[in-house]
């Protein structure tokens, strides 16, 4: 039995969720890593410190620069068919590539796993997290995506312990071409791995008003999140959306401001350690899952909170 | 240009889903069912391409028990031209759905398949990508904008860091994200008109496809519930609690 973890990265920077996926992998058996990139160096410099893994396979190729699903899935299918488990992080890359790979290998993907019960049994949320399904796999190869908030990070060593090996070769697909990206620039911590998240909803009313929240976030060293309504209205970029169909977060502290608390939003944040709700409507559903609720006008409460924190 | 739009009948997004007492599934009796919201977005996008004169024909397809014909009728009422109903009584996983759709695509040869990025019941986010793999077509998942140019489609994708723009050769698979469009409501005259639009029925047995599920559901349970919290009266009290009780700031 062999387990392969696909290393997720963007612009040749390691995605932190990879470490959670490796941790999940070590609950299976014999973990190898695979990096597909046009430049693996910086990523590998981090990976060599991960404990409890066997090999770090790399394929350095311009083809993998933008991680198109067609190229990545073909490469993995050709070179790693003999593995029992192939794990991805449940990021936009993982969600894009893993099911395509499963389609190529005629296996049913097991997405968004939150618990590994045994080597063939996995738990995953369904219906926006309102139910948890335990699935027993009859697949020959399990292709799994891991919800990073449900697993710890892999342990790291100070020493360089991993061994790097070049593997495989591939020619580019001619189905899809990468053009460019418009990435959201931010000095703040990354949303899915931040300790504190400050999220705003439709109650903010405009893009300008979000600055009220951003000041609070910066005081707390927090990442910014949002509800779907705030993204749809164009107040904030799409990659801030938290929820069933956005990002899943579980920080130590989640502060929901001007967010009503629809089930689709709760699905993305209800595993946070401490939840704070600030909403002027004392009946708002967000209060039913808040550890601390404050029924007040956000335009009064948030600046006051910001000024009183030091 | 011919567009195929798969549509799924799911529990309406407003329903608070409950787990059955025997923990075999969620409660589905007497629950409001609707078209998966992402599939509505897919139908809408196909209609807009037709209105722009880019597409000429839109076919909606659904798989399952006879009730799924209602969902096809919804798509027809929105403006799709015809429907395909794949009659199937057993439970279908995305892998099986992708296989069935592959077989249909090989028959009717659409130039484009637009479908939801995920169904809000099983939250799998898989069928589109699997279908692209099986057909060996390009895929553009999580689309928030698209434009057809000759034999190619330009798509803006919602990714973790922002937006990515790609170009995919046709035929291709596009999966929709929330920002692609706002679906229209079907008007009464269009609902009436939809009743006369044709729906082709295919029996899944006739396709000769292995649809045996690969995942056996052992149990469906409630998630862990959170302990009830408290309401604070002031910002000062909030800060005090976060500092001294929760110790998170
Ligand atoms: C297929 C599908 C997928 C979805 N996926 C997601 C998802 O991933 N994430 C997500 O968040 N949603 C998602 N939704 C949308 C979800 O159902 C809700 O519509 C959305 O979360 C509502 O956002 P909101 O709470 O910001 O807005 P609203 O529900 O409009 O709430 C605004 C809140 O602000 C409060 N407010 C207003 N003014 C003030 C003020 N001055 N001070 C204090 N409070 C104020 C109001 O009392 C209200 O409670 C999805 C929906 C569908 C159909």
Image: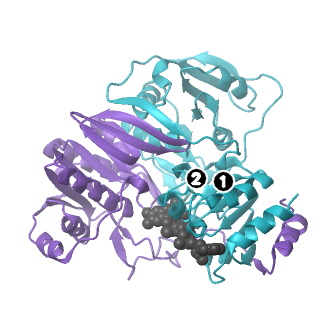
Chain colours: A cyan, B purple
Locate residue A229, reporting x and y percent.
51, 64
Res B142 seen here: yes
Locate residue B176, reporting x and y percent.
37, 52
Q: Which residue is mark 2?
A: A240
Density class for disc 2 (Cα within 10 Å; few <14, some 14-19, many ≥20) is: many
State the residue at coordinates (37%, 63%).
B37
Density class for disc 1 (Cα within 10 Å; few <14, some 14-19, many ≥20) is: many
Say what secondary structure mark 2 lies in: helix
Q: Is residue A224 left or right of residue B43?
A: right
- Of callouts 1 and 2, the N-terminal one: 1
Locate residue A198, reporting x and y percent.
69, 59
Q: Which quadrant of the rendered structure holds the N terminus of chain B?
A: top left
State the residue at coordinates (23%, 64%).
B75
Residue at mark 1 shares a chain with residue at mark 2: yes
Snapshot quadrant of residue A187: top right
**Which of the four quarters of the rendered structure image does ligand 1 lie in?**
bottom right
Q: Is residue B243 left or right of residue B68?
A: right
- Image disc number at residue B211: none
Q: Is residue B197 above or below residue A192?
A: below
- The CA distance from mark 1 to mark 2 is 7 Å
Q: Is residue A278 above or below residue A61?
A: below
Between residue B210 and residue A179, name the one nearer to us.
A179
Whether the residues at callouts 1 and 2 have beta carbons within 8 Å, the answer is yes
State the residue at coordinates (86%, 73%).
B236
Say what secondary structure mark 1 lies in: strand
Locate residue A202, reporting x and y percent.
55, 67
Q: Chain of mark 1?
A: A
Res A140 seen here: no
Q: Which residue is mark 1?
A: A224
Kindly tell me whether mark 2's CB lies below 8 Å from ligand 1: no
Between residue A26 and residue A136, name the one nearer to us.
A26
């Amino acid at each position: 039995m062999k387990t392969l973890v696909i290393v997720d990265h963007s612009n040749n920077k390691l995605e932190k969720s990879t470490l959670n996926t490796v941790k999940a992998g070590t609950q299976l058996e014999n973990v190898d890593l695979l990096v597909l990139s046009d430049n693996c160096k910086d990523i590998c410099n981090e990976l060599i410190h991960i404990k409890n893994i066997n090999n770090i396979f790399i394929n350095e190729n311009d083809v993998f620069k933008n991680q198109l699903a067609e190229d990545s899935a073909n490469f993995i299918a050709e070179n790693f068919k003999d593995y029992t488990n192939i794990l991805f992080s449940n990021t936009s890359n993982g969600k894009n590539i893993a099911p395509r790979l499963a389609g190529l290998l005629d296996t049913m993907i097991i997405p968004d796993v939150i618990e590994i019960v045994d080597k063939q049994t996995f738990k995953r949320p369904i219906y926006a997290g309102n139910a948890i399904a335990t699935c027993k796999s009859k697949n020959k190869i399990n292709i799994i995506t891991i919800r990073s908030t449900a697993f710890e990070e892999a342990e790291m060593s100070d020493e360089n312990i991993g061994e790097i090996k070049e593997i495989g070769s591939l020619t580019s697909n001619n189905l899809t071409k990468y053009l460019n990206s418009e990435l959201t620039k931010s000095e703040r911590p990354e949303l899915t791995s931040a300790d504190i998240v400050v999220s705003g909803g439709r109650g903010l009313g405009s893009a300008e008003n979000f600055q009220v929240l951003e000041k609070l976030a910066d005081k707390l060293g927090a990442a910014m999140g949002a509800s779907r309504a705030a993204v749809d209205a164009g107040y904030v970029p799409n990659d801030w959306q938290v929820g069933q169909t956005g990002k899943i977060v579980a920080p130590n502290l989640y502060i929901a401001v001007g967010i009503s608390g629809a089930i689709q939003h709760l699905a993305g944040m209800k595993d946070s350690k401490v939840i704070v709700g600030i909403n002027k409507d004392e009946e708002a559903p967000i209060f039913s899952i808040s550890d601390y609720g404050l029924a007040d006008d956000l335009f009064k409460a948030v600046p006051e909170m910001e000024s009183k924190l030091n | 240009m011919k567009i195929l739009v798969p549509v799924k009948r799911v529990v309406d997004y407003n329903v608070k889903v409950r787990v059955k007492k025997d923990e075999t599934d969620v409660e589905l009796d007497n629950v409001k069912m609707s078209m998966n919201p992402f599939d509505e977005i897919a139908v809408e996008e196909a209609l807009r391409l037709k209105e722009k004169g880019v597409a000429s024909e839109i076919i909606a397809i659904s798989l399952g028990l006879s009730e799924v014909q209602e969902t096809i009728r919804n798509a027809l009422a929105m403006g799709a031209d015809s429907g395909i109903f794949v009659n199937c009584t057993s439970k279908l996983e995305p892998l099986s759905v992708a296989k069935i759709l592959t077989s249909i695509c090989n028959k009717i040869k659409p130039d484009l398949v637009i479908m939801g990025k995920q169904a809000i019941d099983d939250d799998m986010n898989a069928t589109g990508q699997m279908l692209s793999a099986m057909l060996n077509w390009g895929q553009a998942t999580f689309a928030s904008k698209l434009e057809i140019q000759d034999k190619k489609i330009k798509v803006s994708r919602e990714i973790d860091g922002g937006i990515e723009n790609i170009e995919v050769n046709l035929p291709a698979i596009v999966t929709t994200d929330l920002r692609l469009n706002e679906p229209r409501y079907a008007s009464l005259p269009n609902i009436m008109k939809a009743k006369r639009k044709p729906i082709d029925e295919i029996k899944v047995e006739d396709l000769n496809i292995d649809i045996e599920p690969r995942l056996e559901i052992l149990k469906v349970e409630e998630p862990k519930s959170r302990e009830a919290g408290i309401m604070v009266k002031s910002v000062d009290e909030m800060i005090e609690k976060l500092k001294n009780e929760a110790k998170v700031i």
